[in-house]
Every structure is written in C-alpha cells, then in structure tokens.
Image: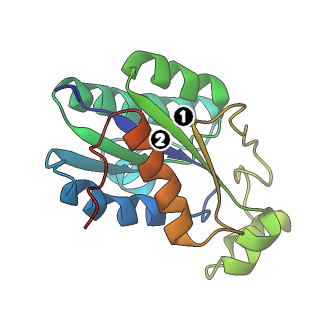
Amino acid sequence: MSDRGFVVWFTGLSGAGKTTIADAIEPLLRERGITKLEKLDGDVVRTHLSKGLGFSKEDRDTNIRRIGWVAEVLTRNGVCVLASAISPYREIRDEVKASIGNFVEVHVHCSIEELTRRDVKGLYEKAIKGEIKNFTGVSDPYEEPVNPDIYVDSEKEELADSVAKVMARLEELGYVPARTPA
C-alpha cells in the first residue's frame, strides 16, 4: 500500500444506490485503517462547489470535472475518496480516471422500472411524462461504462453483496489490507 490515496467512483442513474453503497463502505474502510477518507456526493457537490450549474451537457461535464479535480487533489495527498455522482458521460469519466490513476469505477446498475418504483418523490414518473426535462436516463443520456472495474446490480443484489464486491476488489488492488480472520 502506498501513501497515495485512491478513488472509488460510483456511477449510475439517480436512485440506483451509489451513495447507499458508499455510506456502507465508509466504516469498513475505517475499520481497515483508512483514516484519511472523504466522501464526495454529487448532490452535495452541486449545492456547494457547482452551485449555479444547470443540466446541459457542458454543465454536467463541468460538474464531473470539478468532482474529479477535488478527488485528484485529495488522492495526491493520501486520501481515499468515495465519489458518488451520476456522471452520465463516458468520455468525462474516462478523462477523470486518467487524471487520477488510482481509480476504481463502480457501475451501480438499476432498471428504469425499478427506479420508478423506488422513487418516493415521483421524479422518474414526471420525467417519463415529459414534465421534467433533461432527466438522466429518461430524456437525457446515460452512457453506461463499457468495462467498469466493478459492476453491481442494486435491483438484484443485496447491499451486503454489493459492498463485499467493492471491498474484495480494493483488497485485490492492494488499496486496503485484507480482512484478518477472527
């Protein structure tokens, strides 16, 4: 394990479970001795760092580049970053990945039908009816990763199984120490 940090980048549609998985992984990383840890959640970043940006392709790209820049600075300083952002465009995700290096892309998949069923705010239903414009996955594109480091299906997998996949990959890469048997 090096002094350089790493990024676990969760990408997927709104409501797929990106933040839920990141939240479940955080205490496990801390248990393994990762004390320098930050979460960058897409919604929180939009409120603070990217306030004023809209939802055009250019604004979405700018938002992801900003999250990527912060993640890169943190990893350079030995911090582990859990980034949860829809990040709809493959080209920008690949650009961010190349700039960071120690980067694990996690595609959190869930069908539109299931996301609509889960959506307590009714945003998917409104987007499908055309009441909300530029909604990623409905009226705006989401380009799924071609070859993510980890693929989880939050519709079919239990949270614990998705978390275990991520932790196992981080162990394989040497980013976190293996769990010692009790």
Residue located at (82% from left, 70% from top): 113
Residue located at (56% from left, 37% from top): 60
Q: Nearer the viewer, residue 84 or 141?
A: 84
Q: Nearer the viewer, residue 28 or 106?
A: 28
Pick the quarter of the image with the N terminus. top left
First in residue order: circle 1 vs circle 2? 2
Say whether marks 1 and 2 touch (CB < 8 Å): yes
Q: Is residue 165 left or right of residue 129?
A: left
Going by the numbered disc 1, the residue's amino acid type is Asp
Q: Which mark is residue 59?
A: 1
Q: Secondary structure at mark 2?
A: loop
Residue located at (22% from left, 23% from top): 76
Distance, label 1 to label 2, CA atoms, is 6 Å
Seen from this angle, which residue lies furthest front? 181
Q: Position of residue 138 (x, y in %)?
A: 79, 55
Q: Quadrant of residue 68?
A: top left
Seen from this angle, which residue lies furthest right? 129
Q: Which residue is mark 2?
A: 53
Going by the numbered disc 2, the residue's amino acid type is Leu
Q: Nearer the viewer, residue 12 or 1?
A: 1
Q: Position of residue 178 (x, y in %)?
A: 31, 48
User: Is residue 84 something one can see in this rendering?
Assistant: no
